[in-house]
Image (tube, grey):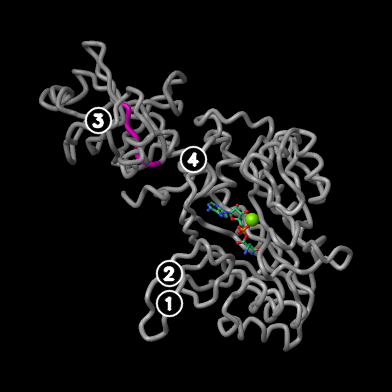
Amino acid sequence: MIETTIARAGQFKGEDVTIKGWLYNKRSSGKINFLIIRDGTGLMQAVMLKQELPEEQFNMFDELTRESSLIVSGSVRKDDRAPGGYELTIKNLEPVQIAEEYPITKKEHGIDFLMGVRHLWLRSQKQFHILKIRNEIIYAIRKFFYERDFILIDTPILTGSIGETASTLFSTDYFDLGKAYLAQTGQLYLEAACMSHRNVFCFGPTFRAEKSKTRRHLTEFWMIEAEMAYCDLACDIELQEDMVVYTVEHCLEKCRAEFEAIERDTAPLEKIKKPFERMLYDEAVSFLQERGSSIKWGDDLGAEDETIISQEFDQPVFVMNYPRGAKAFYMKENPDNPKTVLCSDLLGPEGYGEIIGGSQREDNLEKLLARIREEKLPEEAYEWYLDLRKYGSVPHSGFGLGVERTVAWICGLPHIRETIPFPRTLSRLYP
Ligand code: 4AD
Ligand code: MG
């Protein structure tokens, strides 16, 4: 007997195969019983006909509960009405474990309940397909960097220097060395590595003790960051554009079935093309004020502000050169207006808001030190980082893309919580 998967079953039309999976659903028309089986590669309808399988197996139908694990063997038949296009006529059925009453049913469940059973919810079709799209997004970005000769640098999770802001740190006691912080970013370490490898990237979990409950914030999220030596903000922005276009095109090519399964209208994604919109922060402030925002020059854009901008354009929008006070200490002073820094936030379209934060880095030793002091960051912790400005300092830039926000945008999801297998938020540590 050939053992195969549901995805490959079509190759064995007319032959007998074995499939190992779980019972997704079942129904009966009295004489004929139907099992909908999932095996991690797809869904398949399997038919139980009295004359085709041993009587005691046929009679098991009532016992088979949802999510029971089972192994079925039978012949593959083409059937255009069946999901996946093929159907299995069962000749042998072997339960592996009969599942207890499954908590997720056809009725509408509240989000808290579903998040509480996230370990089981992952088996539901929509969740299954979202995580497949996530997989393709991550693959596309890694491939993009590989094709451009970027080197993967794994940056530490336990860190001594604060990467972004002191206000959202998770810390833990670190033996005799005081506090260690969970990484908010790999950037500072990438800055060191790009002086060795020129073009580098990292991909890892990052942590922020965000006390706000929003649809865009997690306390643990995955970030893909790049850092390039001899690269200014314009070169940084161009790379981001290329990467986002590449990723969207990859998903449109590879994830047709998944987009259909989650009912994502792909028309807005088909429009994504270079060049993206560009707007200076100053322009963004007037743009927002004209549309009723209470933003004042100097403020960071609020979530609402980002939504307003990103609803007005079909393309992602780069908002550039924010006021110094609204951004992190490491960003390079804008020589044309020292009250601002050379940076960009990329806002996704369709109201998604910031998905990438990037900047040119301050490469001047005195200016960087002054910013560290101004932000009252502990100078000793940055000695190594300041060294990079003493030994062959060069203009360099980089960015960080939030994986979950990108998945939310590409999948068209209103909330970030379904874009990661086990979301960590202010109110959730289990499962
Ligand atoms: O804008 P951020 O804070 O930038 C950095 O961390 C830089 N060090 C990156 C760099 O230049 N190497 O974060 C980058 C991205 C944001 O644009 C957003 O997509 C995501 O990370 N992000 C979050 N995603 C989910 N939950 C949170 N709490 C997030 N905070 C940031
Ligand atoms: Mg940011």
**Mark closer to the observer (4, 3):** 4
Q: Magenta stretch: residue 355 in it?
A: no
Q: Which mark is first along the chain, 4 or 1?
A: 4
Whether the residue under disc 2 has CB within 8 Å of ligand 1: no
Image marks 1 and 2: residues in contact by CB distance under 8 Å: yes
**Residue at (28%, 23%) from the top-left corner?**
26
Q: Residue furthest left?
A: 56
Image marks 1 and 3: residues in contact by CB distance under 8 Å: no
Q: CA distance from mark 4 to mark 3?
A: 22 Å
**Which residue position is annotated with label 3?**
66
137 above or below 69? below
Residue 165 visible in the snapshot: yes
Image marks 4 and 2: residues in contact by CB distance under 8 Å: no
Question: Range of the magenta residues?
Answer: 36-40
Q: Which mark is first along the chain, 3 or 1?
A: 3
Q: CA distance from mark 2 to mark 3?
A: 43 Å
Q: Which element type, helix, strand or loop, lies under badge 3?
A: loop
Q: Which mark is first along the chain, 2 or 1?
A: 2
**Residue at (19%, 18%) from the top-left corner?**
51
Q: Nearer the viewer, residue 327 or 11?
A: 327
Q: CA distance from mark 1 to mark 4?
A: 37 Å
Which kind of residue does numbered mark 1 sit on?
Lys
Image marks 1 and 4: residues in contact by CB distance under 8 Å: no
Quadrant containing the N terminus in the rendered view: top left
> Could you tell me residue 19's position as x and y percent?
31, 38
Q: Which mark is first along the chain, 3 or 4?
A: 3
**Which residue position is annotated with label 1?**
179
Q: CA distance from mark 1 to mark 2?
A: 6 Å
Q: Residue furthest top?
A: 30
Q: Nearer the viewer, residue 314 or 368?
A: 368
